[in-house]
Amino acid sequence: MKKIGNLRLITQILSLVLVNLGFISALETGVVAPVFYCHGCPAASFGCPIGVLQNFAAERTFPYYALGSLGLFGLALGRLWCGWACPFGALQDLIMRLRRRKDVIKLPPFPWLKYLSLVGIMIAAGIIAETAFCKVCPSGSLFAAIPHELLPSESTPADVILFQPSQEPQIGTFFYVHLATLALSLVLFVIIGRFWCRYLCPLGAIFGVFNRISILKIRLDESRCTGCKKCLSNCPASFKEVESIGVSSDCIQCGKCIESCPTKALSISASLRN
Amino acid sequence: MITRKYHLPFLRLTILILSLVFVALTAGEQYEMVRTMVRFICTSCMGLDT
């Protein structure tokens, strides 16, 4: 039953297309994306939630709009966004598809680490009044720094307003820092499944809180569960208990457990009651 | 007292209302601020020196 895996691939591709419609000027929106994607990308059509939150922290303005948007997105789907729509998650899935599963290192979960990452990023932005994390963000490296260098250098109207010709921004030290963080991340993605999502993603920390209360998520029908634990064999989050599926802040709701379940005890369903 | 049976729906409703209020109150001004972030180049994201 690989139906879920194929469906997820389609939604990930659709999401990647959707967040890159900004090459059409009218589609450069002020909507906060529910995925970890850099709005520094030349074709970005949505705002990166972590970049936006940092900008507001740096300006000492309470981010009502961004938090409200993330609240609505989280309430609806929780970390389904991570498993089904995030381009950075899709990259990690792609790398895992190219690997043999048995080579993957299974590390125990450290759910608090991503919360530490989120708090640290926001405090840093508030203290130094700058988007500090963006300077090292591996997503920014992949979707903004590298494309910006590869694409023909044509000044956009925004560039013209921001910089005089003599002041046009040049590649700086942080470009190479970007390349280093991306290279390190890619190595970690190869040896540890969904490393970023499980341990460091600040957006995953936000949506992780919503996993317990989101309307659409993976639910367990206890009357059908035989306790065989086959669902845990392919879990990218390395859960040890069936009860963690769908509700733990580490669960990216990818649905691999649903594919493995012989009794169809697990399913993605919407409910307002539980 | 809110029993366990009702606490999840109640929590969902609270978050829904709070989120909608947050978005509705600031959508105009802060939406434009985010739009500006998307439209202008981000030198931090690109590793550029200005």
Image (tube, rainbow, N blue to C red):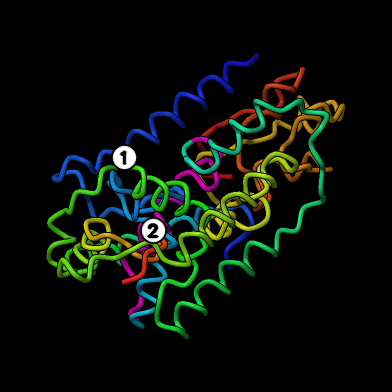
The reply to whether the magenta stretch includes residue A44 is no
Q: Position of residue A203 (x, y in %)?
A: 52, 57
Task: Kindly identify the residue that appears in the image at 63 percent across and 33 percent down.
Answer: A95
Relative horizontal placement of residue A131, taking residue A201 as reference (left or right): left
When the figure is inspected, residue A194 is found, relative to residue B21, above or below; the finding is above
Q: How many marks?
A: 2
Q: Around disc 1, counting alpha carbons within 10 Å, would you say few (fewer than 14), some (14 to 19), or many (20 or more)? A: many
Quarter of the C terminus of chain A within the rendering = top right
The image quadrant of residue A51 is bottom left
User: Which three-letter amino acid code belongs to the residue tagged 2?
Assistant: Met
Task: Kindly identify the residue that appears in the image at 64 percent across and 36 percent down.
Answer: A219
- Does residue B11 show up? yes
Q: Position of residue A149 (x, y in %)?
A: 36, 49
Residue position marked by numbered label 1 in the rendering: A20
- Does residue B25 show up? no
Circle 1 chain: A
Relative horizontal placement of residue A102, taking residue A79 as reference (left or right): right
Stretch of the chain drawn in magenta:
A61-84
Give me the disc on residue A67: none
The reply to whether the magenta stretch includes residue A80 is yes
Q: Position of residue A110 (x, y in %)?
A: 75, 58
Q: Does the residue at mark 1 contact the one at mark 2 (Cβ under 8 Å)?
A: no
When the figure is inspected, residue A72 is found, relative to residue A236, above or below; the finding is below
Residue position marked by numbered label 2 in the rendering: B46
Which residue is situated farthest in the bottom direction here? A127
